[in-house]
């Protein structure tokens, strides 16, 4: 039995599907405990990662745990996992953890999660993805409304990854001992600017979309208005404006681990066309 947290999210839902397709039994944890869209036979469980007592029973009989980072209950959940006999944990972390910069709020919470996992005594694998292709969904309203799309951080060239590929890597790390004690840095197959991704999305939709870069102060204001706390706004400015994180390098990890090249953004855009219509 495998326990997948964040099971209704971008990565978790793909991982639940991948495990089920591999013939594994899966328990899918989210706060809602939502079961719609999950493959037949998957057990949907309601649990809150900030309240470990709500997750404890779901650890019964579990062999491998896929853990989302940054929740208040993570240390207790890991201790409970050890007690329950869990053998392996795969943590969803991020490329920025590789900077080791605890003063950056995003890298900091990922590093705290990694510390908790290391301290748990469980066999672990950390997955360090670049930015997710699904972040493009944040522009969906603009794309539905017109052909000009305002994009933050217009000069940040990044190797965004399809959460499908993150899940494929996590699947291998859950199913075998081969990746124990390893940090797997995973990227998509190409480095693109935000304007490139807007153009590719346009092509998928049969439209000529045009990106206009936001001034940094506009981006700051919009992130603040969207409720992103200031330390996190600062963290993203650190990555994409001050250049503390280089997400522009394509890495071979997905292909090495899965035997298959990671999916392109054009493929992702075709798969998610309905979200932009
Ligand atoms: N986006 C990026 O570019 C990027 C890059 C690198 C790393 N990451 C990391 O990836 C993570 C997000 O992954 P994602 O995009 O797959 O997730 P997501 O789509 O945002 O979904 C979050 C999932 O977690 C569940 N959840 C939220 N709060 C919870 C709680 N308190 N207890 C239990 N479950 C909870 C949600 O379901 P309910 O709401 O029903 O609980 C949902 O299933 C973040 O930690 C981020 O640091 C993201």
Image (cartoon, helix red, strand yellow):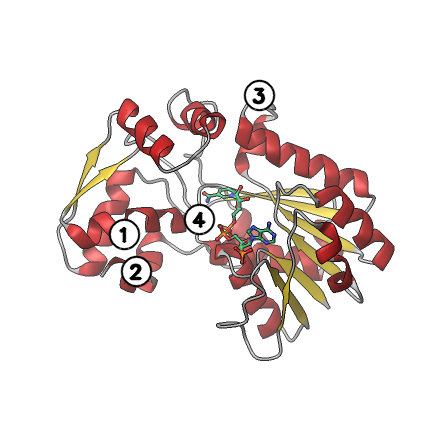
Label 4, label 1: how far apart the Cα atoms are: 18 Å
Q: Residue at x 40, y 51 (%)?
A: 134
> Is residue 123 placed above or below 107 in the rendered structure?
below
> Gap in Å between the C-alphas at discs 4 and 2?
18 Å
Is 42 situated left or right of 190 in this image? Answer: right
**Which label lies toward us, 4 or 2?**
2
Residue named by callout 3: 103
Q: Position of residue 65 (x, y in %)?
A: 70, 56
**Label 2: element kind:** helix
Closer to the chain start, of discs 4 and 3, is 3
**How far is disc 2 from disc 1 in space, using C-alphas?**
7 Å
SS category of the residue bearing label 3? loop
Q: Position of residue 72 (x, y in %)?
A: 67, 41
Image quadrant for the N terminus? bottom right
The kind of secondary structure element at disc 4 is: loop
The quarter of the picture where residue 185 lies is: top right
Mark 3 or mark 1, which has the lower sequence index? 3
Q: From the image, state whether disc 4 or disc 1 is nearer to you.
A: 1
What element does badge 1 sit on? helix
Q: Tell me if I can see residue 241 in this picture.
A: yes
Q: Are marks 3 and 1 in contact (CB under 8 Å)?
A: no
Numbered badge on residue 275? 2
Name the N-terminal-most of marks 4 and 1: 1
The reply to whether discs 2 and 1 touch (Cβ–Cβ < 8 Å) is yes
* Front residue (pair 162, 228): 228
Q: Name the disc covering residue 140, or none.
A: 1
Apparent side of residue 64 relative to residue 248 in the rendered image (left or right): right
- Find disc 4 in the rendering and name its residue: 161
Q: Earlier in the sequence, mark 3 or mark 2?
A: 3
CA gap between label 3 and label 2 equals 36 Å
């Amino acid at each position: 039995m495998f326990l997948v947290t964040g099971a209704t999210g971008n990565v978790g839902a793909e991982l639940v599907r991948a495990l089920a397709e591999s013939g594994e039994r899966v328990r899918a944890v989210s706060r809602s405990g939502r079961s719609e869209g999950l493959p037949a036979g998957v057990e949907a469980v309601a649990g809150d990662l900030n309240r470990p007592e709500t997750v404890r029973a779901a650890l019964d009989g579990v062999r491998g745990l896929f853990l989302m980072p940054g929740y208040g209950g993570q240390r207790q959940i890991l201790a409970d996992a050890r007690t329950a006999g869990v053998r392996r944990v795969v943590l969803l972390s991020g490329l920025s953890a590789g900077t080791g910069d605890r003063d950056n709020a995003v890298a900091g919470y990922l590093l705290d999660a990694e510390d908790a996992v290391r301290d748990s005594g469980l066999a672990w694998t950390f997955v360090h993805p670049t930015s997710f292709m699904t972040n493009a969904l944040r522009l969906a309203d603009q794309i539905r409304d017109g052909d000009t799309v305002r994009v933050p951080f217009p000069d940040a060239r990044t190797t965004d990854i399809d959460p499908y590929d993150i899940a494929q890597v996590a699947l291998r790390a859950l199913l075998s001992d081969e990746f124990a004690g390893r940090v797997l840095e995973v990227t998509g197959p190409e480095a693109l600017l935000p304007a490139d991704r807007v153009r590719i999305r346009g092509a998928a939709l049969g439209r000529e979309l045009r990106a206009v870069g936001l001034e940094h102060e506009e981006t700051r204001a919009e992130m603040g208005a969207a409720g992103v706390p200031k330390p996190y706004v600062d963290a993203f400015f650190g990555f994409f404006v001050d250049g503390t994180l280089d997400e522009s390098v394509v890495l071979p990890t997905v292909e090495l681990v899965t035997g298959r090249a990671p999916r392109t953004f054009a493929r992702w855009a075709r798969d998610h066309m309905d979200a932009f219509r």
